[in-house]
Amino acid sequence: MTSDRDTLNKVLALYGSSFIGIVLGFSISVFNTRVLGKEAFGDFKFIETVFRFIASIVSIGVFISITRMLAIAKDKIYRQNLIGVFVVALLITGFIGVLLLITFSYLEPIWFSDNLGYFFRKYAVLFFAILGSIALKEILKGLNKIYILSLLYTLPAILYLICAYSYNLNNVLYFEDIFFLLYGLQFLFLIGVIIVLKPNFKIKKSMIDDVAIENKDNGRPVYYGSLAGVATAQIVGFSLSYYIDNTQVGFFTLALTICSPLIMIPSVLGTVFFKKFASLKYMPKNVIVFSIIASLVAVVLFFIFIEKVFLMFYTEDFSPAIPISKIVVLGFLLHGFGDLINRFLGAKGKGKLLRNSAFVVGIVNVLGYTILVKYFAVTGAIITNVLASATYLFMMYYYYTKFIKTNKDV
């Protein structure tokens, strides 16, 4: 009974913080668009795309491996040692990412017409904030530290809005200032959370071997899948910038931001139940039903209110994001259901299945975000987004049913 109450409390805490996080993300988006304008906002989103693309490349699956090991670990000292391994891995992969960003900074003016190369050199160190935040969300999921995870969704955003708004009252904010402030605060919060987790750096070779084995069997296959699925989804920022301009990058990514709440419902359920999924034979029916009903209600409300709500907060300059969002929201709905199944299979250590499905999604992304964007511009990007999400859900459902049939008598 106590366990069920604790789970409910964590579900409510993460849903609450996720909802607040969405409101804060929306507020940040409104603030940034009004301060920067459509051209500078497009540059800002292009820069974010590059940082996140490189973050998806450098981890080689080690954070995913540590997350699952934390979820099934029984010994407290062993968990603290695993957190120590996480910190060391973060430092190594972060340094590699910084080097890649500096290298890209010299190639960027050759490939693109925006001359932003200097920015990547100047702020490369903030790569640790982006990579660390992504990795830490996984680690906290494995530790079942839902309350700390809730703070990670909200506190840095609140501090950013307070600091940015206060500074902007008497000063002009440029996209460089916004990037530095937003991710500088995330970097400080990252350090704070790591200190709270109390990593133990007395790491034995046997633990490194355990992580290596887990990475080979689960983490690395998921990583390869992430490269195919998640990293290739970032291609749209590059292709829109290359074939059109960064303003279109801003419109498209703004539409994605508006639609992102739709993925929250199944994703939060998957995160909270991740540790329990490791010991269950199948996903609880009530979890699936609640996810479907709540998501469909959210989509209906989205279509009813999106246009009026958007124009209440954003200027007319950003209105091209409205028709984009009305279509890609369907992709977010499908992707959210796929994420719920993904969490279950991930908790079961089925990294190779996740990898295989991501390869298929990656093919859709690469072909769509290059060929379709070249010939159909933003429309090509929209079609690709929805098609890739539908493919993702289909592959997740296929592997889930296959897993259930294989293990029903085990």
Image (spheres, rainbow, N blue to C red):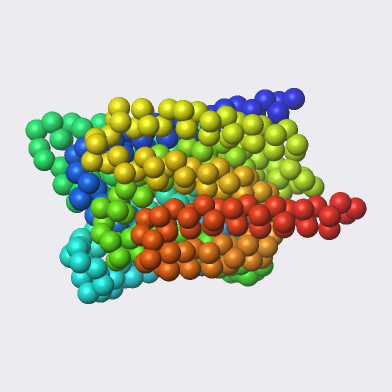
> Which residue is at a point 44% across and 41% down the rendered structure image?
326
Q: For the view shown, which residue lies furthest in the left direction?
A: 170
Q: Position of residue 316 (x, y in %)?
A: 24, 36
Residue 127, image quadrant? bottom left
Q: Position of residue 238 (x, y in %)?
A: 34, 63
Q: Position of residue 282 (x, y in %)?
A: 77, 46
Q: Is residue 245 left or right of residue 74?
A: left
Is residue 405 something that shows in the picture?
yes
> Which residue is at a point 77% across and 53% down the rendered structure image?
401
- Between residue 389 and residue 72, name the one nearer to us: 389
- Between residue 47 and residue 60, name the one nearer to us: 47
> Which residue is at a point 29% across and 71% down the rendered structure image?
104
128 over 11 or under it: above or below? below
> Which residue is at a point 43% across and 68% down the rendered structure image?
371
Residue 51, image quadrant? bottom left
Instruction: Say which quadrant the N terminus sits in.
Output: top right
Q: Position of residue 44 (x, y in %)?
A: 26, 52
Q: Is residue 131 left or right of residue 174?
A: right
Q: Is residue 110 left or right of residue 53?
A: left
